Image (cartoon, helix red, strand yellow):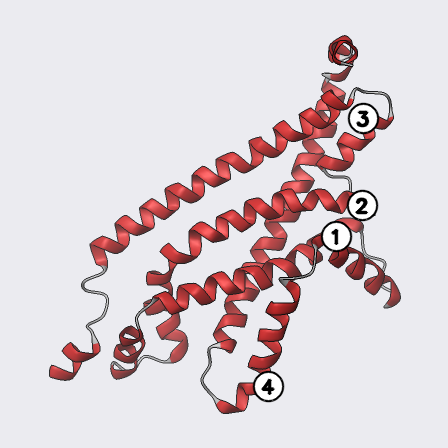
Amino acid sequence: MFQHALAQIDLFFTWQNGILWLRAMVTTLSMAALGCGLGFALACVLVYLRSWPSIALLPVRILLIAYVEIFRRIPFLVLIFLVLFGTRALGLRMPLFWIACITVTVMATAFIAEIVRAGYESVHRTQWESATVMNFGRLRTVLFVVLPQAWTVIIPPAFSYFVMFIKETSLASQVGVYELMQTGKYFNNVGISPFLAFGTCLLIYFALSYPLTRLGWHIERRLKHRFRRIAGPVLPSASVTASL
């Protein structure tokens, strides 16, 4: 089998095949980036509403908690089939690429919401109280007091989940999305050795994932360094504010 793979190297590594792999790589990265980007924005809104202390929003908070708990426990493959047949049942003939993006968004929102919530909770309660004393509104408190301090908690696991979703998109091949895994299947089906087809797939997944992981480490270090420099003057503690 290895001899068969070696004999096909010249046939496999061509410009035409390289373009197919490049298109598949762009599709994979686009699904993960669009889904996780929109999921991150929705997760921030979800956590903002979930942490609102008003009694009137209690039903909304219960629904949001249920959403997070449910979709964090549904496998990606099951969810993508639910989204596919659900949209078909509603009469929506969406491209399979967007079916995969919606699935990533739904799942990423649930996972990242827990990361953002942990970031909120990492900020000491006195920071919230000090912002209230200084007449900050809730949105202003979150944007200018809580999130700047929470990024060091949010960024590392968020990047880890982004890398995870890049790999999870391989399951989109089960519904026909032409991404990296589907490309590997195509080459294997036309007679290319599985070592070449899926080995190339493995190398491209690594080439996508590893730099992003390093970028996450770099951003984490920069944020920690920046926070150490500005942590003192951000807001006085509640006790200091009271004494003033």
Which is more foreground, mark 1 or mark 3?
1
Which residue position is annotated with label 1?
Answer: 77
Badge 3 element: helix
Of the image marks 4 and 1, the number of the one nearer the N terminus: 4
Say which residue appears at 85% left-offset and 68% top-offset.
Answer: 90
Of the image marks 3 and 4, the number of the one nearer the N terminus: 4
Cα–Cα span, label 1 and label 3: 23 Å
Of the image marks 2 and 4, the number of the one nearer the N terminus: 4
Badge 2 element: helix
Cα–Cα span, label 2 and label 1: 8 Å
Cα–Cα span, label 2 and label 3: 16 Å
Residue at the limit of the structure toward the left, as seen here: 243
Could you tell me which quadrant the C terminus lies in? bottom left
**Which amino acid, mark 3?**
Phe
Badge 1 element: helix
Say which residue appears at 25% left-offset and 78% top-offset.
Answer: 130
Determine whether, in the image, residue 109 is placed left or right of residue 211.
Answer: right
Question: Where is 181 relative to 105, above or below?
Answer: above
**Which amino acid, mark 4?**
Pro
Which residue position is annotated with label 3?
Answer: 187
Which residue position is annotated with label 2?
Answer: 174
Which residue position is annotated with label 4?
Answer: 59
Determine whether, in the image, residue 230 is placed left or right of residue 189.
Answer: left
Residue 180, picture quadrant: top right
Of the image marks 2 and 1, the number of the one nearer the N terminus: 1
